[in-house]
Each structure stands twice: as C-alpha cells, then as structure tokens.
Amino acid sequence: MSSVSDLVGRCFRVSSDVLGLLIRTLRDDGYIAIGPRKVGESIQLEVLDSAEDLPRGWGDQQDAGTYRLVRRSDAAYFGFNLGADSWKKWLDPNRKLLWRAKREGESWEVEQAHTQVRRMAFIGVRACELAAIKIQLRVREVSRLQSNSTDTNSSALSAEVSVEAPEEPFLVGLNCSQAAATCFCASVHTGPAFASGCDLVLTEVLNDDDHYFLIQILTKRGARISSQFELQTSIADDLAHIDRQVAQVSDSQSRQLNISNPVDFFSRRLEHSHWDDVAARCLSCANCTLVCPTCFCSTVEDTSDVQNAVAERWSRWDSCFNLDFSFIHGGSLRSSTRSRYRQWLTHKLGTWHEQFGSSGCVGCGRCIAWCPVGIDLTAEVKYLSQATR
Amino acid sequence: MVTIAKEVNLSQAEVQLKGVVAGAGDQYLPVAYSVTSRKRETADTVTLTLKPKDSRSSVCPRPRPGQFNMLYVFGVGEIPVSVCGIEPDGALLHTIRRVGAVSVALCDSKVGTVIGVRGAYGVGWPVARMRQRSLIILAGGLGLAPLLMLIRHVVRCRSDFADITICIGARTPQDVPFLREILSWQRLKYDAGLFDVRLIVDRADRDWRGEVGVVTSLLPRSLTAPECSLALICGPEVMMRHAASDLVRLGLSHCDIYLSLERNMKCAFGLCGHCQLNRYFVCRDGPIFSFEKVESLLNVKDL
C-alpha cells in the first residue's frame, strides 16, 4: 500500500458497500456523519448511524409545486435528487442561542452561549450544494470584513474573499446520476460537474450486472479516510464514465436561467408589470426562502423566563416574505406581496452580485418544487425579459 | 422501516463548527450601561444618558455624528437608536420616542436601569466634507436627534464653515424636541457668515408666534453658492425626498445632499438582511446616504 498522501488526486473503484465503512470510519474519526435519510415522505439531511439509514432504492419525482418519493426498480443508494433540506440546516441552524443574561437585582450580566464545536461530515453533497455552501460562507465573510472597516460607505469588495475556514466540514461530494425536472445547475454554472472543494467525490455506477462507486480523492484528510477502504485501481474508462454521466445529467436539464447583465436587468425592471402577475399567484408563504440553500436572512428573538430573571437571545431563520420583516414604526415598508417577491428575486439574482460578487442562485430548483402554487423563477425571469415595463 | 436516528434530537443550536458556522454570538453581545439620567423631551420622547455600568466593564467605541447604537432592554428586546450626543465624560445620549414595545420600555426605564448597548454602527454624516462649506441642515420631528451631535459640533467649530442654515420642523409646538437648545442656537451671534436657525410647526396652538407649515418651506429661496453647499437631512422619508428635490432645484449636486434612512434592523452588521434597500445594507452602508446613491431607489414604491 502506498503512503496515504499518494492517494490524493486519484480515482478508484470501491464496492457498493463502501458507504457503511465510510460512515463508520468518519464516526471513528470523531465526525458526526450527516446525509440523506427518508423521514416520512421526503428525504432529509439527518445524522447517519450506518448505511442502512440511506434511502436506498428510493427516487423522487419533482416539478413545479411537486415532490413525491417513488420506489425505484433498482437498489441505487443515491437515485433521488434534492429534498427540501439543504446543508444550511447544519451550517447555519434555524435556531441558535446567541447569549443568555441573568438578572442580579437591578442589574444583569450577559454570557455568550456556550457552543460545542462538533466535527461534521456531510455525505452526498451535490455540486450545486457545494456552491451554495461557499456562497453562505462568503456572505458571512463579507459581513465580518465590512463591519470591521467602518465608514467605507462603499459596497465594493476586495477581489477575492477567502472562504477557507480553519475547520471545514468533511465533504463527501456526489456526482448526480440524474437530474430532477426542477434542476437547472448547468445553466448557472454551479454543476453538475465538481470543480474542487470536496474531500472525496463519489460517483455511483449501477448497471445490469454491476453496482460500485468511483471515488475521487481530493484532499489529504480524504485520503486518510479512504485508506481504510479496499481501493481497486480504476480503469481509463471510469473517468470517462464520470464525464459521460455529468454530461448526460447536464443535457437532461430542460429549465434554464440565463441573465446576461443581472444587475442592470433587474434595476431596469423594478416597476415591471409582471411583478403584479407573480403577486397574484404568490402566497407569500416563505417556503422558497426556507428551502433555498443560500437564503441567509435571520431575525432575533429576545425571550425571558416567567420571573424575568433569565433572558436569552435566539437567532432564527427569517424570510423577506414575512410581513414584519420590513416593519418599522408605522407599518411594514414592503406591505404588498408584489414588493416582497420583487425583493426576493431581485436580491437573489441581481443585487446579490453587487453585495457578494456572485449570483445567490445555484440552480438547485428547490424553490420551484416547494412552492405550493408552483411559481418557477426561471419562467418568471423569462416573462420579465419580454419588456421592461 | 426507517426510524428517526438516535442522535436526531441532538440540539442543532449546539452544533456549531469553528470558523464555518458563524455564531456571530459575540457580535450580538451587548455591553451593560446604566441609565444615569432621564429627561423628558416631549410628551412621547425621552432622552437617556448612558454610562458603562462599572469601571471594569467594556465600553463601546465612541460614536461619530450620525451613527447609531443597538439598545437592549432586559427580556424585552433590542432596537437601533441614533446617538444624539456624547457628554464630556463619554456618556451616551439617546433620544427615544415611544412607538413600540422596546422603545416604550426604554422610555420607561429609570435612573439605575441597566441597558444593553452594541455599537457604534453605520456610516456617519460626512464631517470631513463639510469644512469651509455652507451647510443646510433640515430636521423633521425626531429627525433632529441624529443631527443634534452634528449641530453641536457645527456650533462649537462655527469658523470651520461658511453660511449655516438650520431648518427644524415638528407637528405641534409641544412636539419640538430639544426646544431649549434650539432657542439657545437662535440667540447665538457670530461675526462672520449667516447663522440662521428656523423653526416651523404643522399645526400651531394659541401661544405659537412662529411659522406654520411644512419644514421644506423654510428652505432658502435661492443659494448664492450652491456648488459650495452641503445639505444634511433627517426626517420622514417623504419629507427627505421632497427636500432633496427642492435642494437639487436650488442648484445642489445630488452628491452634496445627505439623508439618514430608517429600516428594520436586527443585527446592525450586514448579516440579518432586514435593512436591505436594493444593493445596500442600510445598517452598514448607511444609515447616511448621499442622494446620488439612493434617489432612484427612494422613488420606487415599497422597495
């Protein structure tokens, strides 16, 4: 066996039961393994104890306003697409305790919330989701950088903001073996191919008489974990297979999102009549923002116990679709659904570029599938393209 | 059968990854300040003087004119409030109107009450650009509060500026905040340059001898040197829009007119998303903006 670091950059075949060993090895190494699990009638991202927890043999049907799990005719481990959960559930949990304060007479003392640092390993991260993780990291990085440099009065960003963190979650990427009808990552260039950024990338190969994974080892810690597996030398066609599979997933995507100059596109369309058309359908339910892997808005809740002796501040996901999101004394600034949908879409696809240097959309299609009335942002953008008013 | 994982009840609130999961908990930590005096300004506004709770406790950075702090009342909540002054000993002055749960609790706090302070946040008034220029300062209602520290600076360093016109509007004579101080400004005499402090109310009462009307009607009819003038405006957004347009007609450049905007804010450091105005985070990129930056945005309804 060659030394562990020699494995970096190489691709191997591993048997389909490697997933159990992967989860066990990660757990033995101190990671909490998190990945897809069938919970009720959907696939969620939850803690995995073993490969038995993976939704093997399940697939899904998705379209605008539709998400259904269906039994597959085969035993694929990853024969489904994205569920409502994204990794932000773990990286930026819905509810976080920020601090606690205790009253002592007239005064009080505040203490920062004790946060237990846990090492997480994410299993089955798709290319679009890796892009989303990076976008959320960048949002926080920009906030930290710009709030430290006061009085800049400028939204200009330095050319590159590092998204490298001292301890990133262990990322096991997954090349998609199929696209849902809602997917459009290819058109926004976040997938389906991986560039880099994962520790390992898996590709599931399943045909009539064979079921195995191809594993690409991209980092040293990825190599250390993989050294526990029975790695079989891959053949030349294996890498070509990955390329073919990625190309096929890409070609099968029918939805597209192409905006050549997004900042200009939306700033010219703030009064477009189509906003009224969307508003007539939109329920302002906030589903799209909750399932969106990059939506980062939060609110704080200040609570106290019955005796008003202990007070806490919690952070919680919030949505620009909520009426009180823009509340100042006298009323909400965005009181109409029209203005709230416009805020979401123009931010996600337009002003996000000015704030964070990229689009806020990774083409995962969750907002299309989980919209109860099937509003499809790719279609809305097409309508908005037709005229400027 | 799929069962819920044993560790699923693992509190997500506790799962934080160093460096990756931005807890931001430290950025949300308030510093304890004590209310050392409480002064009623009008029927519904109060000015609180805040000092660090004890000599050991940390102190928020000294705010510049136009910046704001986040003020927290134990167990009630937190709101952004502009800084309206700093005492010589560094104590913070905040003027608050009773409009919601937190502001009512702030107004009702007594001397000795401990208030949480985070700040100072935001971009202040363009003090560096003001030197040697004529200043037009326009305040509507409690919009005078974020301008107060600036006006005190202007009064103290009068010779640094050319003509100074201060226009203050309020709903009724009873609603004029800092009235005694305004009257003291009106009595000031300087050797050189215009120093004009004008006051107007929407609705007069029997005893009112001053002007009646909207604050924009106090603006000068013409300006001798608009290219050397700078306008600083704070008040209701509709008033600021009209005032800025009037000033443009008087010959001021869009980039020489500054407004102070108000939005919902939870974090104050550009992360919670609440205060967004198109591309801007008002907490971080504002609350003071040049008219050049926001004119087109303010003209869009409900943006």
Image (spheres, grey):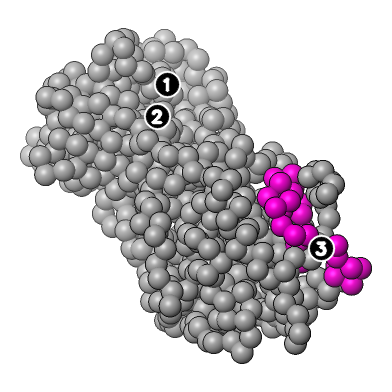
Marks 1 and 2 belong to one chain: yes
Residue B29 versus residue A282: which sits nearer the camera? B29
Q: Looking at the image, can residue A267 be seen?
A: no
Q: Chain of mark 3?
A: A
Q: Which residue extends farthest left? A: B206
Check disc 1 and give the amino acid type: Pro
Q: Note whether A294 is above or below B75 in the view shown.
A: below
Q: Quadrant of residue A352?
A: bottom right
Query: Magenta residues, as a range?
Result: A214-239
Question: What is the x, y in percent for residue B154?
Answer: 42, 19
Going 85% across and 62% down the picture, which residue do you hit? Answer: A233
Q: Quadrant of the N terminus of chain B?
A: bottom left
- The residue identified by callout 2 is B119
- The residue identified by callout 1 is B61
Q: Residues within 10 Å of mark 3 (few under 14, many from 20)?
A: few
Check disc 2 and give the amino acid type: Gly
- The residue identified by callout 3 is A232
Residue A74 versus residue B97: which sits nearer the camera? A74
